[in-house]
Image: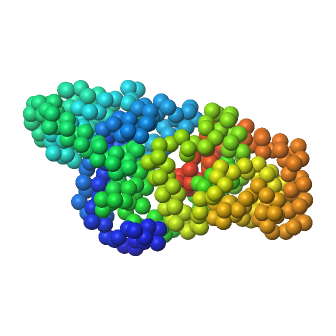
Amino acid sequence: MPALQSIEPTRTFPAKSLEFWFDYTCPFAYLGSTQASALAVRMNVTLDYRPLLLGGVFRAVGQEQNLAGALGAAKAAHNAMDMQRWARRFGVELRMSPNHPMRSVEALRATLATKIDPKVIDGFYRAYWVENRDIADRDVVADVVGRAGHDAQAVLAAINTQAIKDDLKKRTDEGIAHGMFGVPTWIVDGEHLYWGQDRMMFVEGRDPTDVKGPPRAPAATKQKTLEVFWDFSSPFAYLGCAQVEALAKRTNAALRWRPILLGGLFRSIGTPDVPLATFSQVKQRHIMKDIDRWAAYWGMPFKFPSRFPMNTVKALRTYLALPQDRRSAYQSAAFRAFWADDRDIGGDDVLVSCVGDEAIAKEALARASSDAVKGELRANTEEAAKRGVFGVPTFIVGGDDLYWGQDRLELVESALVSG
């Protein structure tokens, strides 16, 4: 199997070990757990399940204990849709309990008391995320471990022993020391860390062409619209927008670009101007590594700019001021100027070079300060807030089906070709 050695030169293939770090309280960890065994088989390694107490991790990194409750309304709604989309993609059931999040420490200790039996893990995940049972309840714990073939009374006695309590704390501390900030977390060969059920292609080390698969033929349904809300200020918009025209072509989508002022959107919905700066240091480090992985995956040059965050108002207005047939090339050039070449896209000289024609560029720059252009950018930004956009890139299929992030383009494509 071809390996992603060009993406991660520090990885060696084949992998020698795979750890799956989890707590029962995270729906995405549940989703990852349903795929973990098959992933290990494909990698030809023994899967090492690693339970930890997510609340302990959150305390260590300064994260809210109820993560879902700390999200804005639009992002919370998107996350709820996102988990269901992944459940459908994986072909599994997932039901959000009205009592979520529920205490998991007893179930985690019971898992340790059964020597981390995969049948017990599956049982607790099913109890929580399919049956919505309280896995802190002793009767539920007894039922889950008993169905997995263990002595329920012996397990119930063991979960209160100091040895089991200390074991869970030790494992949680180990996860924190590895740099974890959430679950599911995968660790390959003891050092390469990946976060999320949606990073398994990086975990496995598959060739990018194998991950993406062959182009899909358009579905035999009427053409769907694909709206893309974007700003030059986001590295993920840089990566995602570069893929959109090819995606629209192979799915026969009607593409509509919607440039917005991300800072204006953030102010209108109460989000910090630079969300990355509010994350813990461990999460920031992981996100920077994740950007590098995605850039290599898409085959795009990337260098985090020295001017970040950047005022992109002039660059966005220039885009809107250009003739339609000049916008695509300008967008690509301006994105690359900022996110690959570390150039100041707030300066006229750089913007002129991105347009590529001095006369057209100067005309666009003059028009960029007009009320019409300013009003269009402002209207796009206001509409984004009304339609539930909370970041970029955001893709809306068919007028109301919203996806956030360049890492959701595969889901976007599926939505475009579905009936």
Q: Can you say whether 363 is above or below 7 in the image?
A: above
Indicate the position of residue 326 as horizontal and vertical percent values: 80, 63
Q: Can you say whether 192 is above or below 121 in the image?
A: below
Image point 86% across, 56% down: which residue? 365
Report the label total: 0
Q: Nearer the viewer, residue 63 or 367?
A: 63
Q: Is residue 378 left or right of residue 177?
A: right
Image point 31% across, 70% down: which residue? 14
Q: Can you say whether 361 is above or below 386 in the image?
A: below
Indicate the position of residue 237 as horizontal and vertical percent values: 62, 54
Q: Nearer the viewer, residue 216 or 65?
A: 65
Image point 73% across, 51% down: which residue? 312
Indicate the position of residue 46 as horizontal and vertical percent values: 23, 60
Quadrant position of residue 304: bottom right
Is residue 214 visible to the viewer in this orientation of the structure?
Answer: yes
Q: Is residue 343 left or right of residue 11?
A: right
Q: Is residue 120 left or right of residue 42?
A: left
What color scheme is it?
A: rainbow
Q: Quadrant of the N terminus?
A: bottom left
Image point 74% across, 58% down: which residue? 345
Indicate the position of residue 80 as horizontal and vertical percent values: 48, 37
Is residue 152 visible to the viewer in this orientation of the structure?
Answer: no
Quadrant position of residue 244: bottom right
